[in-house]
Amino acid sequence: MAKLDEKIDGMYQEVLKRNPGETEFHQAVLEVLESLGPVVVKNPQYLERKIIERICEPERQIIFRVPWQDDKGKVQINRGFRVEFNSSLGPYKGGLRFHPSVYLGIIKFLGFEQCFKNSLTGLPIGGGKGGSDFDPKGKTDDEVMRFCQSFMTELYRHIGEHTDVPAGDIGVGGREIGYMFGQYKRITNRYEPGVLTGKGLTWGGSLVRTEATGYGATFFVNEMLKARKDSFDGKICTVSGSGNVAIYTIEKITQLGGKCVACSDSNGVIYDEKGLDLALIKQLKEVERRRIEDYTKTHKHAKYIAKGNIWDIPCQVAMPSATQNEINGKDAATLVKNGCIAVGEGANMPTTPEGVKVFLDAKIAYGPGKAANAGGVATSALEMQQNAGRDSWTFEFTEKKLEDIMVNIHNNCFETAEEYGAPGNYVLGANICGFIKIANAMVAHGLV
Ligand code: NDP
Ligand code: 2IT
């Protein structure tokens, strides 16, 4: 990766000092700052106006107590977060993550990434992220509902159609959005669909939002392959995770002619040489909320590798779709050695800096999360458009819009990388392209 310019290095040191212990946030900031040297040389006003320093400091950070009662009547306490990072391009927009690993540093890394991602979509959305260290695993439906209601009892005062619009992320899907929407409506006495996205289809949701992140990431990889005169046709693919993003990545890859042979969860890996049975995965994960291990109960030919590493399985296309830092330098080297030619990040920051370096050095097609997984939030913005117009679009129309957005993001990143002398480097392209739009809006808005 590029060496940090001296001035930019000073800014990074300041971020380290001001945000002690938030290692994921440091990692996300460093990756962006490493790309910005040539941009500030071309635009010295960004330095004068301290645009980078301002972008690294969230506009507002909310941390709150979330008390709730479990089914036994025992009192439980979790911590809730909403970090409103940057509103120069539109209302804060970004998901909510419910996972025991959540702390401020994770929400800040996600919120920071979200700003650039949302800018890349070309739609009018700023960046934010939130969540809680609540663990939905093993909780009953009633417990999840009580938690969501308590979470929204604080969050409602900070959000709104023109202020901040949350959605899902790890541990937050249609069920949780429903409980939060219900509580928001009850507290405010307003039927305000534009306050959350990822809603159910009969109460303000958009077709394609469920599929959007996985479909979008696959469209992005398809464009990277096309740019190399290649396609998904007949490619062996592996997709980590087995949640929302993984499921619809597998679906679109299969539609485009690829063959997915492996997926995973935090306990282990499923390897099915014949190609994954997606209907079974949907039944296990979306309907029955079971573990991926149960795939082998009906499909005895498939292998379950407890605590296995999915990146050890040879593939031509890898789509990490679980969590941050799931591909380290060694995993990246294994993938390249086994013949992987494209990596598209459905997850946010799934590759460590060492892993990114391996992919860039090997010159494989590497689509970083903030570009490749932008289809989810882009379709959230399409949901906001439909809500504002009290409209609902067909599946085909919405999917075509999503595909056009992904093609555009791909082309913008590709062309920006060429313009800055790093052809094929989508990391540089995405960071610069995402940054410039925010920076110009911030300059236009004055010192705010
Ligand atoms: P889900 O909760 O639906 O699924 C998450 C999947 O990843 C599960 O299979 C889960 O396994 C696995 N996983 C989560 N944490 C870990 C971990 N620490 N180690 C190993 N496996 C883990 O979430 P999504 O599919 O929505 O999100 C997946 C990724 O995509 C995240 O990085 C998210 O930020 C990103 N993303 C999501 C978008 C969306 O629209 N939902 C949009 C853009 C990016 P287990 O069940 O064992 O925990
Ligand atoms: O990381 C992400 O882009 C998301 N979790 C989706 C955010 C959204 O507002 O749809």
Image (tube, rainbow, N blue to C red):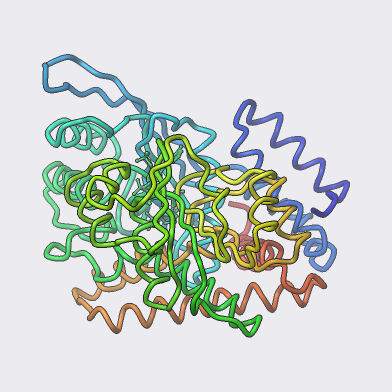
Residue 135, image x and y in percent?
Answer: 32, 30
- The residue at 65%/58% (across/down) is 338
Residue 360, image x and y in percent?
Answer: 74, 60
- The residue at 47%/66% (across/down) is 217
- Which quadrant would residue 62 be assigned to in this image? top left
Left or right of residue 406: residue 11: right
Q: Is residue 258 above or below residue 289?
A: below
- Which quadrant would residue 9 be assigned to in this image? top right
- The residue at 20%/76% (across/down) is 392
- State how many labels appear: 0
**Does residue 316 appear anywhere in the picture?**
yes
Left or right of residue 270: residue 119: right
Left or right of residue 104: residue 275: left
- The residue at 16%/37% (across/down) is 145
Which residue lies most toward the front here? 301
Q: Nearer the viewer, residue 311 or 149?
A: 311
Q: Is residue 418 above or below residue 364?
A: below
Which residue lies most toward the top here? 74
Which residue lies most toward the right here? 6
Q: Is residue 207 above or below residue 190?
A: below
**Does residue 167 appear anywhere in the picture?**
no
Residue 353, image x and y in percent?
Answer: 70, 46
Quadrant of the rendered image holding ligand 2 = bottom left
Residue 75, image x and y in percent?
Answer: 20, 15
